[in-house]
Image: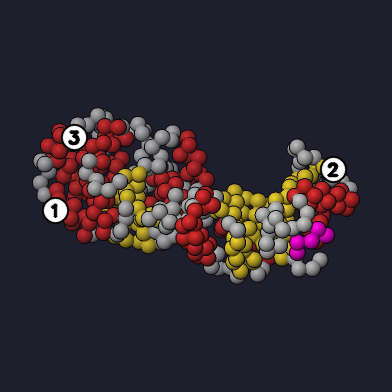
Amino acid sequence: MSNIKRVILLKYGELILKGLNRHKFEDLLIKNIKEHISDFEVEIQRMQAVVYLFPKFEDQIDLIVAKVSQIFGISQVDNAYIVDKDISAISEIAIKLAAEYVNVKTFKIETNRPDKSFELTSYEISSEVGRQVLQNVPTLKVDVHNPDLIINIEIHKLGAVVYVEKFVGAGGLPLNSSGKGMLLMSGGIDSPVACYLMARRGVQLEVLYFHSHPYTSDRAKNKVIKLVEILSQVIRPIVLHICHFTEIQLAIKTYCPHDHLTIIMRRQMMRIANVLAQRNGCKCIVTGESLGQVASQTLESISVTDNVSEMPIFRPLIAMDKSEIIKISKKIDTYETSILPYEDCCTIFTPKHPLTKPELKYIEIKERKIPDLNKMIEISLEHIERITF
């Protein structure tokens, strides 16, 4: 069989709809692909909304497929062969693939012809290749409605592509195509999912974690570090900011009514996040809040918290229920780490009966009773720890 190569096809999702500025998204996607597969020897070409990866070593193909399936902006990954645009060469590959699936009984050929210059129509290609497979693999029968095996044929300008294996990609937009945001991470299930979903929309994230030593242990801190490390497999680079929050929380506890602690604490977190975000070129704040899930996530509480923010706050989980969030958490491999029983600063100081319908004017009055609050915020910002993944 002449001029046969292994190839991995990466197909775009909504990038196709980007019009005149699509090349900017494509250039960024190619950059991200190169970074993710830098450990492998791969030739990269792109043409007609498809990226072609030609691996030098066949034994690395499965590893490469797993890597590129995680890249935002790619909707489908095909593990394929590419041959000359010749019906005999196409049929040989189809026969080879069909013979490998010894436990299947029925098959179907599906053909797509992006290169319309090829002399045969899609129907004619499917019919001829199907006939050849039937002649050479007698255990198989055709079933066009519910086949056990689908052999895909695509006619591209670079050649004819034949494959069975296709994988769903991460979808979304290329990372860093939508600017940068600052994510507030607690260490629970929700915020890592929010991080992933915003990154999937092209937002490069930095992460802010509030640590209240000695009330929150180093195990809680290390848990967050582990979560960011997991996320860094698909979001890179990513910076974790660790803000020491003990003094502020103790002051709130001392000078404010007990049922006001959560909402006033959230407002100070948002103030710190705004300053840090502006210093680091972020254009938004991101949280893992889901409407009504806890007292600080009612409409009234969210409104009072948002009042201190100078930039937009995005909440990608706002309309999700917990089961939906857990499902995504498991998919992105953060769930098992998120459920480790190490309490964060939010849970340590949670009042027994927190305020669910705060009023802004009364919250502001209570805040003004905290001495040196702005100074404490400045000190916390000055002593932030940073870890880059």
Q: Is residue 228 visible?
A: no
Q: Quadrant of residue 83?
A: bottom right
Is label 1 in contact with label 3 (beta carbons under 8 Å)? no
Measuring from the top left, give residue 383's x and y in whole percent: 23, 59
Q: Which residues are magenta?
A: 84-88
Q: Which mark is residue 339?
A: none
Q: Earlier in the sequence, mark 2 or mark 1?
A: 2
**Relative to 76, is 135 on the left or the right?**
right
Circle 2 is placed at which residue position? Answer: 141
Gap between marks 1 and 3 measured at Cα: 22 Å
Q: Main secondary structure of the magenta part?
A: loop
Looking at numbered disc 2 in the image, what kind of residue is underneath it?
Lys
**Relative to 207, is 142 on the left or the right?**
right
Measuring from the top left, give residue 250's x and y in whole percent: 18, 45
Q: Which part of the image, by quadrant, shows the N terminus?
A: bottom right
Measuring from the top left, give residue 314's x and y in whole percent: 35, 44
Circle 1 is placed at which residue position? Answer: 375
Colouring style: secondary structure
**Residue, x 10% and y 41% (percent of image)?**
369
User: Callout 2: few (<14), some (14-19), or many (20+) C-alpha neighbours within 10 Å?
Assistant: some
Looking at numbered disc 3 in the image, what kind of residue is underneath it?
Leu
Q: Earlier in the sequence, mark 2 or mark 3?
A: 2
| Kind of element beneath mark 3 | helix
Q: Is residue 37 above or below residue 173?
A: below
Looking at numbered disc 1 in the image, what kind of residue is underneath it?
Lys
Q: Earlier in the sequence, mark 1 or mark 3?
A: 3
Circle 3 is placed at which residue position? Answer: 360
Gap between marks 2 and 3 measured at Cα: 71 Å
**Relative to 169, is 277 on the left or the right?**
left
Please tell me whether residue 85 belongs to the stretch shown in magenta: yes
